[in-house]
């Protein structure tokens, strides 16, 4: 069924006039939870003032996937039928019917804000070298390149324009083809979502640090992805499989990334506890997202490696100053005693 006739539309609207309280409640909770789940990631990038630790390809694929998912839900005939029913049902029923669209719209907006923060706080090569010099190991990932930021920005904007123009043209001139277009967008979004976390998993594994990646966000989003998919399934059914399958695949891969991030967190915490037990002044890491103090402490504890033998710069300079002062005194001839000279 490519589009709905007037009679079918009226019957469809009658079903939407009495929404299920449980379905509406779940969708509303998911919208609030979705926005809240992205806040730790946004805050962490802003506080650290760097997007180091975020793979450029993860950011790019995530932006493309969320944009195509938004185009998918907006061009689905079932979604357009729901929007058309707002002229026939009450405001509350209309809001309940559009919660599925609001969910994906919020997800798109939140991830696009990550793309924006990634570009604003894109790390320079100097910042990367400084981070590597303070760590107990050398990064095995290449330093950030400004070219990556340009590719992410230009490709994302081009994709948004293409999806928007084609979708508007089909809805206005060829509405019978919107189901096929929506399925195509959903399939591409699913493929991009399936590979989206692969570069981030590789990047985090070789970086041996989560850096600006928020563990709190992933802890919320991994189970939320499956609830999100179930909520969408309740609205679009098996016919809209291309809409909710994206979030099932995303949840599985994000769970793998979460496992790697937690393993690094545990390793860092164990190393910090060991140093504290040896009388070192470094305190254990107690914040999985790492505030400003945690950054200074964990700079020497990345990947769980101890740097106990590494001299502290201030102490090293102090010892050198004492040696220079000793040489100066040794080279100075002793003064003659005034009594003896007399």
Image (tube, grey):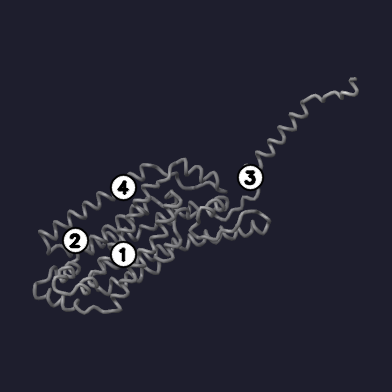
* The quadrant where residue 284 appears: bottom right
61 left or right, relative to 298: left
Check disc 3 and report its element: helix, strand or loop.
loop
> In whole angstroms, how far apart are the C-alphas of marks 3 and 1?
49 Å
Of the image marks 4 and 3, the number of the one nearer the N terminus:
4
**Which residue does the numbered mark 4 point to in the structure image?**
153
- Left or right: 256, with 264 as reference point: left
Q: Earlier in the sequence, mark 1 or mark 4?
A: 4
Q: Earlier in the sequence, mark 3 or mark 1?
A: 1
Q: In this orientation, which residue lies closer to the viewer: 337 or 287? A: 337
Q: Is residue 32 above or below residue 112?
A: below
Residue identifier under label 3: 312
Dot in front, 3 or 1: 3
The image's mark for residue 246 is 1
Q: Nearer the viewer, residue 133 or 94?
A: 94
> Which of the image's four quarters has the C terminus?
top right
Where residue 228 appears, as percent x and y from the top left, is 33, 69
Quickly name the residue at label 2: 181
Tag 2 or tag 1, which sits nearer the N-term?
Answer: 2
Mark 1: secondary structure: helix
Dividing the picture into quadrants, the one containing residue 318 is top right
Neighbor class of circle 1 (other Cα within 10 Å; few <14, some 14-19, many 20+) is many
């Amino acid at each position: 069924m490519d589009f709905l006739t007037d009679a079918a539309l009226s019957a469809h609207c009658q079903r939407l006039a009495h929404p299920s309280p449980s379905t509406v409640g779940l969708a509303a909770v998911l919208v609030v939870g979705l926005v809240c789940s992205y806040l730790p990631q946004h805050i962490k990038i802003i506080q650290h003032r760097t997007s180091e630790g975020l793979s450029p390809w993860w950011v790019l694929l995530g932006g493309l996937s969320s944009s195509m998912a938004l185009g998918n839900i907006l061009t689905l005939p079932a979604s357009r039928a729901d929007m058309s029913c707002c002229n026939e049902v009450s405001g509350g029923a209309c809001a309940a019917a559009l919660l599925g669209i609001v969910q994906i719209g919020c997800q798109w907006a939140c991830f696009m804000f990550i793309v924006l923060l990634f570009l604003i706080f894109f790390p320079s090569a100097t910042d990367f070298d400084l981070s590597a010099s303070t760590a107990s190991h050398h990064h095995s990932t290449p330093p950030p390149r400004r070219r990556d930021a340009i590719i992410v920005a230009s490709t994302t904007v081009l994709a948004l324009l293409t999806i928007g123009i084609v979708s508007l043209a089909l809805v206005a001139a060829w509405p019978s083809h919107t189901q096929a277009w929506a399925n195509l967008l959903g399939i591409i979004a699913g493929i991009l979502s399936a590979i989206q976390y692969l570069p981030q998993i590789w990047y985090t594994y070789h970086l041996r640090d989560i850096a600006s990646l928020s563990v709190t966000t992933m802890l919320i989003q991994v189970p939320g992805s499956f609830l999100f998919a179930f909520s969408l399934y309740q609205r679009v059914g098996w016919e809209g499989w291309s809409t909710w399958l994206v979030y099932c695949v995303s949840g599985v891969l994000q769970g793998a990334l979460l496992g790697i991030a937690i393993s690094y967190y545990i390793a860092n915490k164990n190393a910090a506890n060991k140093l504290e037990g040896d009388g070192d002044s470094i305190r254990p890491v107690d914040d999985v997202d790492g505030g400003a103090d945690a950054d200074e402490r964990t700079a020497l504890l990345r990947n769980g490696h101890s740097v106990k033998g590494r001299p502290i710069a201030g102490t090293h300079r102090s010892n050198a100053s004492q040696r220079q002062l000793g040489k100066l005194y040794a080279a100075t001839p002793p003064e003659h005693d005034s009594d003896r000279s007399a």
